[in-house]
Amino acid sequence: MKSGLVTIKDIARELNISASTVSRALKNHPDISEETKRAVNELAQKLNYQPNAVALSLKQRRSHTIGVIIPEIVHYFFSSVISGIEDVAYDAGFNVIICQSNERYEREVANARTLLASRVDGVLVSVSKHTEDFQHLHNLQDNNIPLVFYDRIVPGLEADQVIIDDLDASYRATRHLIETGRKRIVHFAGPQKLLIGRQRKDGYVKALEEAGLEVDPSLIIEADSFEKARLAVMRLLNEKKKFDGVFATNDLTAIGAMQTIQKRGFKIPDEIAVVGFSDGRFSGITDPTLTSVDQHGYEMGTVATEMLLRRITSENSDYPYETRVLNADLIVRGSSVFL
Amino acid sequence: MKSGLVTIKDIARELNISASTVSRALKNHPDISEETKRAVNELAQKLNYQPNAVALSLKQRRSHTIGVIIPEIVHYFFSSVISGIEDVAYDAGFNVIICQSNERYEREVANARTLLASRVDGVLVSVSKHTEDFQHLHNLQDNNIPLVFYDRIVPGLEADQVIIDDLDASYRATRHLIETGRKRIVHFAGPQKLLIGRQRKDGYVKALEEAGLEVDPSLIIEADSFEKARLAVMRLLNEKKKFDGVFATNDLTAIGAMQTIQKRGFKIPDEIAVVGFSDGRFSGITDPTLTSVDQHGYEMGTVATEMLLRRITSENSDYPYETRVLNADLIVRGSSVFL
């Protein structure tokens, strides 16, 4: 074997292990055993293996760690996103550190500083509800740390982003209720000052209009929690409002509506069908189980991480920014059709 | 004012702000505005303020960041622990970075390396279910990074720890069922190879024995999920086993049991009372609501962080290690008594 022309593949063949194991052993990757690292490094030295100097210097500058800024870990959706992020990152030999803003702007700013100080190679970020100044994110970019936004994006900030088409998901959820024959569908809406609240309402309205059904403003109620839904259903029933379907902006709201409807003696889905949004951990344990929109948090995490790793590892990271729009799926269960 | 004797309090009085704001401004803490920092530093210079040199050098070596290793973020209990950690840490001027082991030993090892590379001042750790080698944790200690264990501890590893008295909590949950007049109580138990599973069963047995009730082995069933509970209840009812109470090792198991009991026409709590464990997000949205054990995750996070910050900031951190045992509370709801 001629020295200087020895490749990773040569070492792999000699030791009867995979090339990627050799590559990771040479990078001192934590997943590779000390024994394997020793064997690889000894053979590399013996064969006078010369890594591509440019590639190596790029690699050595990296911490092989990516940072995640997440609004609230307690939400099932966000914890699913983290699972997706971690699976892609660890597979690629990157570690993940997570900072939670807890929906607070000051903490998000502190998160960005902490990740910068930890010398992460890139950051995945979903901004808090209260973030209106983006200097801390520009600051990361100014330090050559690529960003990818997931779920909650920042209009005007140039970066890759992954979002879900909320309007389309709501439209399909409402159309499903219409297809089961419902004509008077209540919408429990999220706060209309938030884009997400407006888009979900717009999808509902679009489906009704397309089907030639009346959009009755008295059936559109801002209620986005278990308790608010219980009160709102109570009021609708006491006012003798007729309705045969409910589309709620999240699952807990749908479940609150379902319970009150059942307590007042109506059958689900026979008399009133209910559809939620975001398919968390609750939809499978209600009785009947809850039809809901699966937002594919895990997939969002994997896609965002793939985009970030591409930015980090590309020789030339100057290619145009990309926005990926994921579709959400309606998961039909017992609250809207007989199963 | 005599120079050299100027204190933080003097600066605070002069600027009409608190001493802790002055202290944090001098430390360049992110929560303090640039304006305040400028004013404090200018005045400190003007008055020739001399910080305690030893204390300052200790402080400057710090990153003011603590690391958290957590098994699974998706669990409500662990996300509550994180909230408690963050509230205490941010209040004290420390940032928090979180690494998830996802119950995998290799990831936990990678987590420890990442936190070491991020130069954290201390680490809060709850070990994964599969961790049997603790070299990665010793390694942190060898690098003078104090550890505090929360919830899942490592016998034999010298460190502060915070745990919950699981046996006592189960004992009280079972005693509550006995106090409502139940005599044939089913226990859906966790895996008996895990300490937590054994302790919860032991608490149940202790309460029965203390009340002079028979411990019937056919009423102790290893079932720790929604689905397993449904199957187990089905089988008990089909075998015409008589029982008037259920104590489950977690809430999802209790909810699975509740649903099947109700579907088979039994009334809760009239005919069968049900108690869960760990008071997650589900207990308030079932019908009836679920009596359960509140494990005080938030409190566990605050206590563990206070212990860690004390280790980090003490001039002499050589004091004996401490184990804090927190009590869990039973939260009585509609599944065990009429509300």
Image: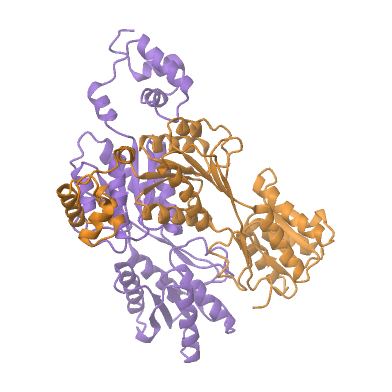
Chain colours: A purple, B orange
Residue A256 seen anywhere in this rendered image of the structure: yes
Horizontal side, residue B117 vs residue A31: left or right: left
Quadrant the N terminus of chain A occupies: top left
* Quadrant where the image shows the C terminus of chain A: bottom right
Residue B266 placement, left or right of B322: right
Along the viewing direction, whichever of B74 and A314 lies nearer the viewer: B74
Residue B149 point in image, percent of width and height: 53, 44
In the drawing, does residue B332 fall left or right of residue A173? right
**Residue closest to the eye, B83 or B105:** B83
Q: Is residue B50 above or below residue A192?
A: above
Note whether residue A162 is visible: no
Location of residue B154 by image quarter: top right
Question: Which quadrant of the view contains residue B231?
Answer: bottom right
> In which quadrant of the rendered view does residue B9 lie?
bottom left
Residue A160, given in percent of the width and then of the height, sits at 25, 50
Write the residue at 69% across / 50% down.
B199
In this rendering, is residue A115 above or below B288? Answer: above
